[in-house]
Amino acid sequence: MIYLDNAASAPVLECAINAAQPFLTECCGNPSSIHSEGRRAALALIEAREKCAAAVGAKPEEIIFTSGGTEADNMAVSSAFLAGLENGRKRIVTTKIEHPAILESCRFLERFGADIKYLDVNAEGYVSAEQARELITEDTALVTVMTANNEVGTIQPVCDIAGICRERGVTFHTDAVQAAGLIPLNVGDIGCDMLSVSAHKFGGLRGAGLLYCRGGTPVTPLIHGGGQENGLRSGTENTAAIVAMGAAMEYACRDILAKSAKIAELRDRLISGLLEIPGSRLNGGISPRLCGNVNVSFAGVEGESLVLGLDLRGVCVSSGSACSSGNEEPSHVLRAMGVPDDMLKGSLRLTLSEFNTSDEVERTIQAVRETVGTLRDLRGWKG
Ligand code: PLP
């Protein structure tokens, strides 16, 4: 099996499994308990928090553990909106290409009076900092722009947008779920107030994530209860998954530039091989783009059929975004980029990790060529 769906979930790293193991098998303590088993779990959370904080250049007390990227995004958007409301600020500026965790949070808040404005993207899948400047008004509570897009891998000008937000005194959040583990992330360099991360995208376990919140940024808890996470996110901590996330983050940051360069070489070969297939196009600009992302459309085929055809040939990929696979609607990201109709439904996302090889890339190119050919023959597509 060739696994090229790392942006959906990456394989769990051995170091993450080893870190989690004792908290699944030996240590049964609840981190809130004061006996030795509880203290052991609590200590492990402290260490994981330190590792996660170091990985993004934050202080440990600025890290709030969550159940994943979706919860971190929801918390960021709702917190900033509620804090803004207190000062009469109702506007949220976001982009047309955010993950549904952001878009649906914004839609939800519209019911409570939020005024949502969306940054456009150009044909290559990039937003503009200048448009962000225009959309930020006196009543803006939050600007939220993803660091890198989950479908087409385009890396957004978040440092520039964060700079504008700082000048205007507006909270800036970035969803770094896809970027974590592939590009170096430093909250100070980005200049963000909040940043979301999800463990299963870089070799941790599903069910853990975090929201970085710069000290002083108002945070409103969404989950109320026993007061864990400094009262900001109640609920007994998922010790094993959090400890695994700490280990995976530490691993992911080590030699990140060398690992990314190796993945980018595989990506570039995969892109060039796939674009040799007639009636194909690359979606999303090449620079700056996540090293692991390839998104290609093929005229005359449906993305879902391609995914299933490739699965039969032992290659796991996704059409559009895996989080919404099974959804027949064409991707909102490709639509926002103005991808032509005949290419909208035939998009394929292949996402690489450091564990993929050149041989797998060559076999994938061949498998895609054959699958596209078969599907086009079935539909009598002539090009
Ligand atoms: N944000 C982005 C950009 C994503 O790609 C995803 C998942 O694919 C999420 C948020 C949601 O993360 P999680 O699956 O941890 O809830």
Image (cartoon, rainbow, N blue to C red):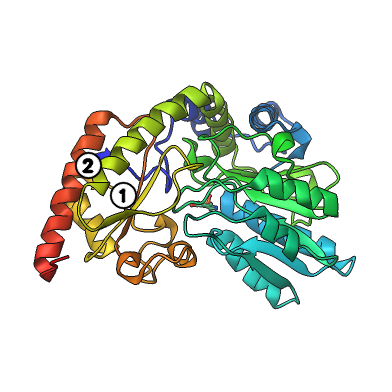
Q: Is residue 375 left or right of residue 219?
A: left
Q: Of residues 46 and 203, which is closer to you in this image?
A: 203
Residue 163, x across and y down, in percent:
76, 46
Q: Is residue 326 left or right of residue 215?
A: left
In three-dimensional space, the C-alpha distance between marks 2 and 1, rounded to whole angstroms, equals 10 Å
Q: Which residue is mark 2?
A: 364
| Picture disc at residue 96 | none
Name the element at disc 2: helix
| Callout 2 touching callout 1 (CB < 8 Å) | yes
Which residue corresponds to the image point at 56% horizontal and 64% vertical from the top-left? 96
Type of residue at label 2?
Thr
Which residue corresponds to the image point at 22% horizontal and 46% vertical from the top-left? 276
Mark 2 or mark 1: which is in front? 2
User: In the rendered image, is residue 378 in sight?
Assistant: yes
Q: Which residue is mark 1?
A: 317
Q: Residues within 10 Å of mark 2 (few under 14, many from 20)?
A: many
Type of residue at label 1?
Val
Which residue corresponds to the image point at 10% horizontal and 70% vertical from the top-left? 380
